[in-house]
Amino acid sequence: MINDHNCSAILLAAGRSTRMGTLKAFLPWEGKSLIEYQITQLKNTGVKDLLIVTGFKHKKIAEMIQSYDVQIVWNHRFYEGKSSSIRKGIEAANAKAKGILICAVDQPVSQITLNLIIDHFKKTNAPIVVPVYQQKRGHPVLFHNNFRQELLNVNEETKGLRSILQKFSHQVSHLEVDDPNILFNLNTPNDYWSQFKKPKGES
């Protein structure tokens, strides 16, 4: 694993969860709330600089995770979209961090896969690491600190992180993982229940 302070992780949890109909952060997931599951998995990788970007229902989320050793960053412009939360997280992240792992609360991934991504970054010094399952790219994505300014400039008009991945596609290191969870995107009740009801490890 990367040594302390060499990697920051940003967990985006600022959205309204409009399509889900209830706040995603509070959904049950493997015996915890979804946001607590995510925090636990990220903390278990050894990442110390963990930032949770909140927005909608900030006080409720902050209260739920107050016992965790994380930095809570409130994005008061969350209504502008995910890119505003990415920028807010990057602004608050450790400027000396070598890598920046960007995660979303509705895209749960286990610590095993997170460790694979971080270890691959450490071993290869890759500019960008993207996990892949059965030839499909997933999440989370780990960026070298050299992309800090690019990340500070993301916006919804240019499709957020996608624009960076397209512009610097020649610098992306694709990491094959045996984990279908990297493709999860829990946007709607159907998305959630289709995954929630499956036995652990089934794709």
Image (cartoon, helix red, strand yellow):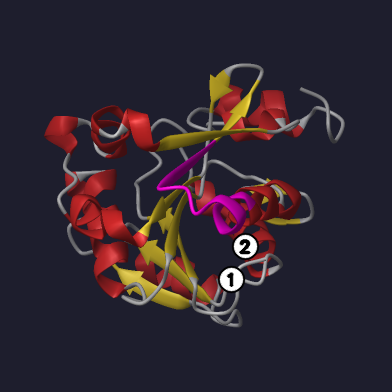
- Judge left or right: residue 14 versus residue 31: left
Q: Residue at x 17, y 46 (%)?
A: 80
Helix, strand or loop at label 1? It is loop
Report, in whole angstroms, how far the alpha carbon at label 2 lies from the one at label 1: 7 Å
Circle 2 packing at 10 Å, graded few (<14), some (14-19), many (20+), is many
* Residue furthest right as drawn: 199
Q: Position of residue 38 (x, y in %)?
A: 61, 57
Q: Which residue sits furthest top?
A: 135
Query: What's drawn in magenta, residue-wise?
Result: 120-130
Q: Which mark is residue 42?
A: 2
Task: Name the amino acid type tagged 2.
Answer: Leu
Q: Residue at x 34, y 61 (%)?
A: 145
150 or 125, nearer to the observer: 125
Image coordinates of residue 26 in percent, x first then y, are: 57, 54
Q: Estimate how packed mark 1 is, as few (under 14), some (14 to 19) or many (20 or more) residues with alpha carbons within 10 Å.
A: many
Residue drawn at 68 percent across, 55 percent down: 115
Q: Which of 97 and 109 is in front in this view?
A: 97
Q: Do the residues labelled 2 and 1 touch (CB within 8 Å)?
A: yes
At a point 40% along the width and 75% down the height, the residue shown is 72
Q: Quadrant of residue 76?
A: bottom left
In the image, is residue 151 above or below residue 156? below
Q: In this view, does 151 lie to the left or right of 102?
A: left
In the picture, the quarter occupied by the C terminus is top right
Q: 6 above or below 174?
A: below
Instruction: Please provide percent x and percent y for residue 157.
Output: 12, 32
Q: In which quarter of the image is residue 162?
A: top left
Is residue 105 a member of the stretch shown in magenta? no
Residue 124 on the magenta span: yes
Say what amino acid the circle numbered 1 marks. Val
User: What numbered label is drawn on residue 47?
Assistant: 1
